[in-house]
Image (cartoon, rainbow, N blue to C red):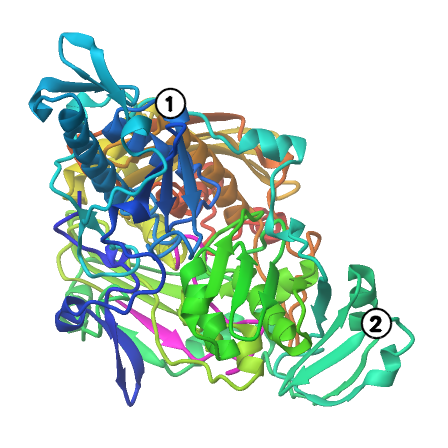
Amino acid sequence: MSSTHITRREFLQSSGALVVGFSGVYPILDVAAQAVAPKLLGPDPSALDTWIKIGRDGLVTINSGKMDCGQGLDVAYAQVAAEELDVPLAQVLVLLGDTKTSANQGGGSASSGVRQGAIPIRNAAAEARRVLVGLAAKELNTIPENLQVVDGKVFVKGNPSQSVTYAQLVGGKDFATNLEWNKKIGNDLNVVGLAKPKNPAEYKIVGKDAQRRDIKDKVIGAEHFTAHIRPENLLHGRAIRPPQAGATPISVDEKSVAFIPGVKVFKKDNFVAVVAENEWDAVKAARMLKVVWTKEFRPLQGGDKKMFDYIKNATPTFVNAVPMFFGKKDYNAEPTNAALKTSAKVIEAEYFAPFQSHARIAPSCGVVDVKADSAQIWTDTQKPHFQRQGIAKLLKLDPANVQAKWMHGAGSYGRSDADEAPYEAALLSQEFGRPVRVQWSREEGTAWGPKAPAAIMSMKAGLDDKNNITAWLFKAKGFNGWDVKFNAESPEHTLVGMQTGYKKWSAYNFNIPEESYQFPNHVHWWETVAPYVEQASPMRTAHLRAPQEMQTRFAQECFVDEVALASQMDPLAFRLKHIQDPREKDILEAVAKKFGWESNYKPTKSGNISTGRGIALYNGYQSYAAVACEVEVNKATGRVWVKRIVVGMDCGLVINPAGVRASLEGQIMQGISRALYEEVIFDDNHVLSVDWNTYRIASMKDVPGKVDIVILNRPDKASGGVAEPGLVSLPAALANAVYNATQVRIRQYPLTPQRMKPLLV
């Protein structure tokens, strides 16, 4: 089920080696390094018992090193396992992200939950069935070929009275069976057994709607989140943040909080925190502790008002022309520039993307209990195995003696603030010898969590006198997508790590479009610029859902529309003419058909309300997605409302159609939110976006008037990623629809009313 054509999004984060050079660190796939088995922490992936357990009651337990970002991944895994084992779906329990019971499958990243995480589960389940049927054959004194399995019961074909259940065969016991492990850790970890998984044509459970199992507990308040964990003898901790970016503490007056019973102050290097017996005392102490800080001079250099000037004028730290995981490649823009000079017409535009915050509905929370030589972590990080590794390094403990247990959290969109509070709790727990719970505030989560990088995308296209494309140039220049790493495997990738002496790494990435448009003299590359503040910055950048892809596809898919109109072509027809991948064409045509896209469509206007349509395409994570929408633009208020929207996806073999639909619905709302509202506002000294008033997100009034989901199920294709593709091109589709409605081209998202209204006069 793996693809033979590997793109940036298909690279699995821990399978490559990081090559260090004088100019920094950049990743290169090291085949020799991959051939050496990595050091194992926790359960052995080559043991079947690591993946599957069968209880005395017949309950099947699946252990996965992934976690659920709110997509219902456990249900999909249960479907895969139930299908291969021939047991009822309700009989399968899935445990996620516990480093004590699961192998490191990379956690949540790169829409890899089903795309890669389900593969070893499918293989292990098929092998478990083979072993069980073999045991049954001995028990029933026959050969495996004479046996059939229904609902976990093995019986002789034609004679159901001769039967034995899985529970009777191995209930409560080990399989004691080895699998072949590919010696990789992370997203591409895989195991295979002697058994061959079923052909999709045989599926009875996979491909059918299956409902989420966690919704009821969430609704009735029974769900157990990280924030609910309360070990005995617990202390509550809070950090004290600098009043401006880059400031460091000069002195701390512990007497200023001495009146609060039980409060203790902690300072290590530039990290200052307090602990208390109850949470409110910790909050009060953090607010009242007197700290004298250094005064920095305009560390954020003009804030968001001067941000794009900063990017334009900055000397690049790194330049690249290939997707970010594949090392460095030079590019040659000369043929493109030469073709542009001789073109009959040249279209050019710059597109702008701001910093955006992860802004999880509940900010970071971590509970850690550190003993003399071990630690227990409760966390809602996307990558618990890597967090275990990093916290072990921070505490100078053997990672084999550290357990990270993943818990549900309220929102999960990449390398967010989720890793931050557990690191702080670990440091405080080790210092005070008791379990510590650290809960970040809304202000901390929005202002101090990692950000999606701001960028400028510069594009040019040439046309000849017959409106044929002669050249195409794409350049992205922005803040580094890897200011901190995509996982917190080492303290320097966290705020507290930087504050306590770990120097930020030097690795670089941004992004380029990878759709199959075929244009003559096509060149594309990206450049990164230095951060405002090198260490412990509130503006440090990292992966946000579909990292750097919304920025680049916003530019590309809007510019595609600009060039289509300049060449006097319908935007859909222009795309279909130039894309080469048949699956891209299929999803575009399916979405257009559902939308009712017509080349002779005319935008309408009634009073202050103008209505128009737009379309956009995305290809990534082994999936294909397209968006078509119709919007209403209010000239008087500047508000954009999505009147109707069609989102389509071809993600290969569909495991759970209900899960795919739910994921796409969530992506529609987050896509609308990021397209219309979300941007980090900051001044010379600090972030001003600190709450839901200063960092706006979509609300109920932004729910589209009509939503249609199109899913192309391809059982003959490997399952692709679902959690991100539908999101990526949504801002471009909205901006294209706004232009169609108003004839005003908006080249910067979010399309806020404040930004829109002056342009619509």
| Residue 649 versus residue 351 in the image, above or below | above
Image spot of residue 350 (x, y percent): 39, 62
Image spot of residue 355 (x, y percent): 52, 63
Residue for point 16% across, 48% down = 3
Determine the image quadrant of residue 575. Answer: top left
Determine the image quadrant of residue 321. Answer: bottom left
Residue for point 19% across, 58% down = 344
What residue does disc 1 label? Answer: 209
**From the viewer's perspective, is 106 left or right of 296?**
left
What residue does disc 2 label? Answer: 262
Element type at mark 1 = loop
Image spot of residue 185 (x, y percent): 28, 61
Closest to the observer: 327 or 378?
Answer: 378
Closest to the observer: 483 or 191?
Answer: 191
In the image, which is nearer the foreground, mark 1 or mark 2?
A: 2
Q: Contact, CB < 8 Å: mark 1 with mark 2?
A: no
Residue for point 71% across, 62% down = 234
- In this orientation, does residue 532 appear? yes
- In this orientation, does residue 575 appear? no
Task: Tell me the kind of residue under disc 1.
Answer: Asp
Closest to the observer: 384 or 502?
Answer: 384
Q: Where, quadrant-wise, is the N terminus in this rendering?
A: top left
Please give the range of residues in magenta: 525-547
| Residue 376 versus residue 76 in the image, above or below | below
Mark 1 / mark 2, whichever is N-terminal: 1
Q: Main secondary structure of the magenta part?
A: loop
| Residue 171 versus residue 208 in the image, above or below | below
Verify whether residue 527 appears in magenta.
yes
Image spot of residue 57 (x, y percent): 41, 28
Task: Tell me the kind of residue under disc 2.
Answer: Gly
| Marks 1 and 2, how far apart at CA | 53 Å
